[in-house]
Image (cartoon, rainbow, N blue to C red):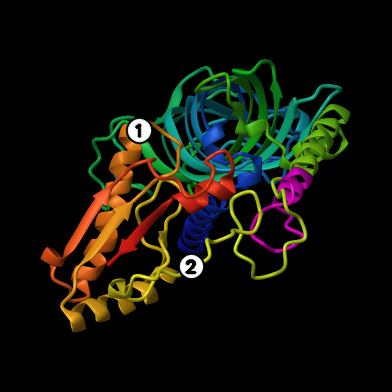
Amino acid sequence: MNYSTIKKTAVAASLVAALGFAESAQAQTPTVFGGRSQYRTWSIGVQGGITTPNVLVGGSNAFGQKVGYFQNKVGEYYGLTIRKQFSHLFGLELEGNRGRIKTYNHDVSGPAAENSLGAKSVETSVNWAGSLNGVFQLGTIDFLRRENAVNFYAKVGLGVMAHNPVQYLNNDFTGTEVYNNEGKWGEEIFGDREATGDRDNRLTAFVPVGVGVKFKLSEVVALNLGYTMNFTDDNLLYGPARTDYKGKFSNVYGGLEFTLGSRDKENLTFTNPVATLYDELKDPSLRNEVEALKQRVSTLEGTVDQLSKDSDGDGVSDKFDKCPGTPAGTAVDGSGCPIKFPEPVAQNNATSGAYYAPIQFEFDSSVLKTESYSTLDKLAKELRDANGSVTLDGYASAEGTEDYNMNLSNDRANAVKQYLVNAGVSASSITATGYGEANPVASNATEEGRVQNRRVEIKK
């Protein structure tokens, strides 16, 4: 495996890792700061600048001279970007550019050296260059405003460029063209496997590595300034020259970036969760609001505790308990007062059999209470054994209309009848009748009296 293959494999692995980082960032965007759905994450940019055949990390140019960084001619370079921000730390960017790169022999650094063709200058036309870059946010700065205004970033990627170098006899890009392979390319580092010899441009893979800074001008527009070094494995980036030279160039650019989406949402590029958390902790107005909410919650909790407090344990809270201190286990009504059941009245009618206390019901209910089951089971057994009959008279307390209470008393009498029928008593031996509010056994002016009037009387 040669150096070129190793380098490309390493770059491809780094991009795969960057894509994995994007997925991780997407999954781990802190929901405490709203999540990505509450931010704008897409942006497009336009940029323009200049190129030079040197890079900051040093090295020689294509003609073998080590020259000062600005001793080479500059060419124009411009393009577009489309970026998706996955978190406040990472985004993926698709970048496209075109332009020119120039290099020549400069007498300041020594005698002008010609290559094997006698060329002293070269101009490489980059007809197009596209790359996929991982953009890493390094930090944001807040300049006396309650929002981040400056963003620093670094990027690395992998791309392909289509280029054609033209070499000139003179060192000022004039004179006879001694090399121009336009229309003759076809065997390339990145592209055709065989020399077709009919292509206008040579395809070359390259690795862009750069840094930059963005200045937030508004909620939509940001000024983008940056510097990128572009490394290739191509020794023909500037045409025939040194065979050991791997072409490289750098570009300095400036441009505008436009954030897409609703202006009501914050730009995720300039979001700083640490600063947001700091604001929540340190901003007086936010802190006061939080304290006010805490006070309201505390007051509400105190009210709930007061309403639910039941000192005597009778199931009625103290606020509504009209008979506090009721002994545990005492049956009470809705106001917390003990329920007084009517005492059984002895009957002298020898033919009437045993006396049965009225069957009691809850307010506005015709459902039998479980404590009535034993009484009704005993009555059912007597009726079956003696083949006897029984009359059931249903009543209601005075709440509600007379018609409603009449229907309710009928339902109560029929509820007792149905229980006896289910217990084996013949339905024909049971007479169930409702009398509504008639014949009260206690006053309907008090809850205690109304409890007694919600009943079904048993007559044998």
Q: Nearer the viewer, residue 304 or 140?
A: 304
Magenta residues, as a range?
Answer: 301-319
Horizontal side, residue 142 vs residue 336: left or right: right
Q: Does residue 262 appear in this view?
A: yes
In the image, is residue 150 above or below residue 312? above
Residue 14 in the image: x percent, y percent?
Answer: 53, 57
Looking at the image, is mark 1 or mark 2 earlier in the sequence? Answer: 2
- Which image quarter: residue 414? bottom left
Please name the amino acid that badge 2 sits on.
Answer: Pro
303 in the magenta segment? yes
Q: Mark 2: which secondary structure? A: loop
Q: Mark 1: which secondary structure? A: helix
Residue 15 in the image: x percent, y percent?
Answer: 50, 53
Disc 2 target residue: 344
Residue 117 in the image: x percent, y percent?
Answer: 48, 36
Please name the amino acid that badge 1 sits on.
Answer: Glu
Residue at screen point 27% across, 53% down: 193
Horizontal side, residue 59 vs residue 347: left or right: right
460 in the magenta segment? no
Disc 1 target residue: 402
